[in-house]
Amino acid sequence: MQLNECGTNEIRPLLHLDISTADADMMSSQYSRPSLSNPTTTNAYFWKQSANTCSYNSDTYGLSDTQSVRAYKLLKQDYEMAIQKLNSTMSSIKTFWSPELKRERQLRKEETAKLVALQRQAGPQNGSGFRVAELETELENCRCELAEKDETIRRLMECTAAVTYHDGGNRMADLETRCNQLESLLEIREEQIRSMDRHFSQLPVAASHAAKDQQIADLEDEIAMLRSERAELPRDFTDKTITPHEINTLRMKMERSELELAQKLVSFSNRKFCLINFEKQFS
């Protein structure tokens, strides 16, 4: 219980820090223990234990002296119990677990050293046996790997054979279709050639060529005769007026004659080419 500045017995509510630090001398005199290694962690551990502490608020401390004293004592007991547990745990770690761990580590080091020494001693005597065992193990591993690789190769070959057979069948079908198309086209071409041969065989080739040659010779003779007659005619130096109509008529006649001559030359060349082809075929 604390007195205020007026000297009355009015109870002032204690804050969290006041409760945790009140009567520190009394606590230190009653409980003389070694200092904590991490007080911050201890306080955090204490304040996190909500299940072991009593719920309180500022309204509760403002009700009566007995309630506030009771709450203070409960909090103090919980705090002391937590400190005791922490100290006992730390002392057990320092007194038991640390030496035990050191002893265990030392034993492991000694056992490792003994094992190495035994292996060194047994190395010259049983080295060949160990080597044979290692070689047998490696040989068995190689056999397993070879078996796996053989199985993989077999599966790949089966897959490749299946794919190749499928592709080969499709390719063969395409080739057969193409061959049939080419054969039908060849038959059509042969039929056309036979029909052309029959048509040309029915024509009087020799007679037609002879008639054409005779016609060409007659035309050449006529042209030569006209040229000679024109040369023998007396030249007339008198002025003769020619009308545009006559000029156009003469031009048209000349163009028509040239066109007919060109057509006859083309026809003659075609006939001559056909004759040469027939001579080559029958020769």
Image (cartoon, rainbow, N blue to C red):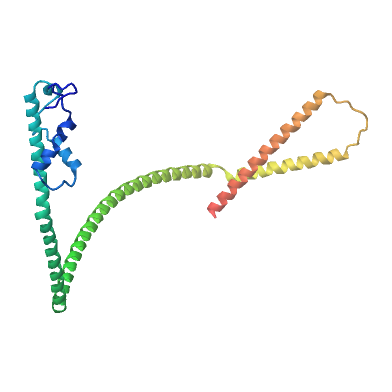
Q: Quadrant of the N terminus?
A: top left
Side (left or right) of 164 relative to 119: right
Q: Residue at x 28, y 50 (%)?
A: 163
Side (left or right) of 46 relative to 276: left
Q: Residue at x 31, y 47 (%)?
A: 170
Q: Quadrant of residue 258?
A: top right
Q: Is residue 158 above or below residue 184?
A: below
Q: Residue at x 23, y 60 (%)?
A: 149
Q: Quadrant of the C terminus?
A: bottom right
Q: Residue at x 18, y 21 (%)?
A: 6
Side (left or right) of 272 relative to 88: right
Q: Position of residue 137 (x, y in %)?
A: 16, 67
**Considering depth in this image, is 226 or 109 the residue closer to the camera?**
109
Asked whether residue 30 is in view, the answer is: yes
Q: Position of residue 249 (x, y in %)?
A: 77, 26
Q: Is residue 156 above or below residue 266?
A: below
Q: Position of residue 145 (x, y in %)?
A: 20, 62
Side (left or right) of 245 relative to 79: right
**Considering depth in this image, is 48 or 186 the residue closer to the camera?**
48
Q: Is residue 109 above or below residue 217?
A: below
Image mark count: 0
Q: Quadrant of residue 8?
A: top left
**Considering depth in this image, is 215 or 265 the residue closer to the camera?**
265
Q: Is residue 242 above or below residue 97?
A: above
Q: Quadrant of residue 136?
A: bottom left
**Considering depth in this image, is 190 or 101 the residue closer to the camera?**
101
